[in-house]
Image: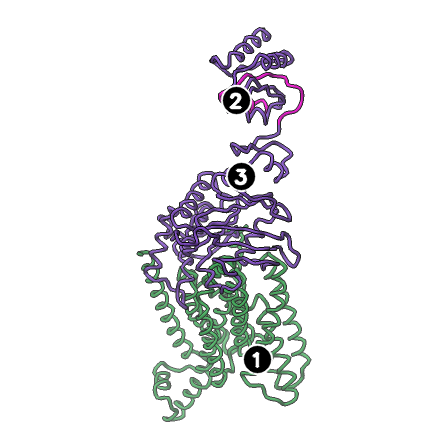
Amino acid sequence: MAGDSLISGDYIYTEHMAVGYGKTPLIREIELHVKRGEIVTLIGPNGAGKSTILKSIIRQLDLLGGTVYLEQSPMQKLSEPQLARKMAVLMTERIHPELMTCAEVVGCGRYPYTGRMGILSREDWKKVEEAMALVHAEELADQEFSRLSDGQKQRILLARAICQEPEVIVLDEPTSFLDIRHKLELLTILKDLVRRKGVAVLMSLHELDLAQRLSDYVVCVNGDRIERCGLPEAIFTSDYITKLYGITKGSYDGRSGALELEPVKGTPRIFVIGGNGSGIPVYRRLQRSGIPFAAGILHENDMDYPVARALASEVISEAAFEPIREETYQRAAALLESCGEVICCLDRFGPFNEENRRLAELGREKMK
Amino acid sequence: MTDRKRKFGTYILSFAGLTVLLIFLLILNINSGSVSLSVSEIWAVLLRLNGAGGDNAETAFRIVWDIRLPRILAAMILGGALSVSGFLLQTFFANPIAGPFVLGISSGAKLVVSLVLIFLLGRGIFVGSAGMILAAFAGAMISMGFVLLISGRVRSMSILIICGVMISYICSAVTDFVITFADDAGIVNLHNWSLGSFSGTSWENVKVMAAAVFATLFLVFLLAKPIGAYQLGEVYARNMGVNIRRFRVQLVLLSSILSACVTAFAGPISFVGIAVPHLIKCLFRTAKPLVLIPGCFLGGAAFCLFCDLIARTVFAPTELSISSVTAVFGAPIVIYLMIRKNKTFA
C-alpha cells in the first residue's frame, strides 16, 4: 500500500486549526502532520486538550478555525461515506451494543463498503476474519461483545477499525484501563499495522514510557497551545517533561522514562555505598521508610545513578569512564562520617572502585 | 460461518413462529365476540365475500366485515407501528426503556388531537383520518421537542424517562380537562378514544392507516443500515459514514409519524413500544435492525391482537380500554428491564 509518491508527503495535516467546545477556541494555530507509516502521538497533562484536538479531526466537534487536509484536499469537502473509507477511529466512549457478537461488531467496519441494506458479502466476512486474526481475537468471534473484558473489547474495536481498511487511524488513549500485557499487545499490533500496511496513526497516550518508545513524532499539548513538537529524543528529556506536566512531587527520568517519587528531605542519616544496580532496592526502601540518605560513590553511567539522583538527598558521583579521584573520595568520606549509619550493597570491588572499598572499610570501623 | 448460519436459522424459525402465532390470534379474534359465530359460518363469510344467503348469514357478514375485520386489522397495523416506533426510540436514546408512551409522545399527540377535534367539531367541521394523523403528528412533535430539550441537558436515562412520564401526565390532565368541559354530544366518544381503544374503526380508517404506516415502515427499512451503525454509539456511527444530524432528524420524524398514526386512530396505548421490542430481541437473539424491524412489526401485531382479544372478551359485554390490558403485560417487562439495566450499567 505504501511506496507511492505520498509516502514522502503528509497524509493528513492541519493548517491554523482552532478547536474547542462551543464557540470559543480552546487551542489555536494547531499544525499537525502525519505521514503514512508513521505514528504521531499527542502527550500532555490531563485536560490539556488532546481529546478535543482528536475529536475535531474526526469531525465529532466542529472546527473553530483552520483546515484539516487529507491527501492534500480539505477534509470538509469529503462526504461522510467517503471519509469513512479513509479514516477509522478508536475513541474512549464506551459502547454497549445489544446482543452483538464480536464478529458483528468488527463487521460494522465494513459498512462504508456495503450496499443500501448493509449486508456483508463473503469477501467482507473474510476481511472481518483477517482483522480479527491480526488482533489475535479469532476465538472471540462468536462471543457476545458486552461480556468481554476491557482488554478484549479494545482489541475488538481495533479490529473494527482495521476492518474499515483506513489510510489513517485516530486513537484516543487506546491503552487506558488495560493492564501492562494488554497495553503492550495493543501497541504492538498497532506498530505492526503501521509497518505492514503503511497506515498513518494519530493518537493520544498517557503512558510516557510507551509514547517514547512507540512514536515517530511527538506533539505536546499544554492548555491553550501546542507547546512543542519533535522527535521523541528531543521531547522526552527530564527537564521538558517536568515542565510540561508541572511535576512538583517526584521526578521523571528522560533516558529511562522512569518515574520516581519525591526524595525524603533532610540531612542524610544513612550513607549507601552502591553501584551496578545493587543500590536501587536499598534507595527505594529508605525512601519508602522516610529516611533521608546519601549515596556514593557512583559513576555517572552507573545504573544506580539516576535513581540515586532522584531519591537521595545527596549523591557523590564521578564522571563516566574516569577512575575515582582522591578528591571525590575525600568528599564521600566526610559525608559518611556525618551519617549515623553505613550500608554497603557491594560484595566485590574492582580496580575502578577501589575507593568504594576504602569507604566500606571506613564504614565498618565507624559502625563498630 | 457456522455461527452465522445458526443465527440465520434462528431468524427463519422465529419469523415462522411469529406468523403462525399471528394467524392463530387472527382466527381467534374473528371468532370471538358478543355474537358467537361458528367456524364454518366465518369461513363462509370470508370465502363468499357477499351477504347473499339468508338473514343469519347477512348478520354474520356484517359483523365480521364491518366490525371485527377492520378492528382486527387496526390492532395489527397499529400494534406493529407502535412496536417499531418504540424500537426506533430505544435506538435513538440508547435506552431500552424508551418508548412513545413513557416519553409522553403519545399523550402529546392525544392532547393536540383532542383540541383540534373539539375546536372543529364544535364548529360543525368534520375531521378525516388524514387530518387526525396530522394533528397527532403535530402533538407528537411538540412532546418530542420537549424530550429532546431535556435529553440535551441530562445524561441520566432514568431522569429522561421520568421527565417523559411527567410530560405525559401534564398532557393527559389537560386533555381530560378539555374533554370534561366540552359539552358537544359528538365529543362523548372522545372520552373512550382518549383512554385507548381499537373499537369503532372503519374501513376508511384502515385504508388511511395502512397507507401511512406501510409507507413509513418502508422508509424505516431503508434506514436499517445507519440504525445498525448507530447501535455502536454516535462516535462510531459517524466514523462508519453516517451523517449523524440527518439521521437523528430522520429517526425522530419516522418514530413520531408512527406513534402519531397510532394515537390518531386508537388513542394512547401503553408499554407496547417497550415490551414488544424487548421480547422480540429475546426471541431472535439479535438487535439487528434488518431483522428487528419486521420482527417488531409482526410481534406488535400479535401482541395487540392478543390484548384486544382480552379487552373485548374478559368482562364482556363491558369492554376494557386497550391500555389497561397492555399495561398489565407490558409494565412488568419495563420493571424487569430497569432492574437489569441498573445491574449492568451501575
Q: Chain of mark 3?
A: A
Helix, strand or loop for disc 1: helix
- Distance Cα–Cα, label 1 vs label 3: 60 Å
Provide the letter of the chain coloured green. Answer: B
Task: Judge the density around disc 3: few (<14), some (14-19), many (≥20) Cα neighbours within 10 Å.
Answer: some
Mark 2 sits on what residue? A320
Instruction: Single out the residue that lies furthest toward the right.
Output: B181
Q: Is residue B141 above or below residue A195?
A: below
Residue A208 % position (x, y): 53, 39
Image hue for chain A: purple
User: What span is in magenta?
Assistant: A263-287
Q: Is residue A99 above or below residue A237?
A: below
Q: What is the three-letter code of the residue carrying label 1? A: Leu
Can you tell which mark lies on residue A208? 3
Residue B28: x and y in percent read: 40, 75
- Taking the image as shown, residue B152 lies to the left or right of residue B286, namely right
**Location of residue B260 (image quadrant):** bottom right
Q: Amino acid at mark 2?
A: Ala
Badge 1 is on which residue?
B134
Q: Secondary structure at mark 3?
A: helix
- Distance, label 2 to label 1, CA atoms, is 87 Å
The residue depicted at 37 percent of the width and 88 percent of the height is B49
Was residue A276 drawn as part of the magenta stretch in this picture?
Answer: yes
Which amino acid type corresponds to the residue marked 3 in the rendered image?
A: Leu
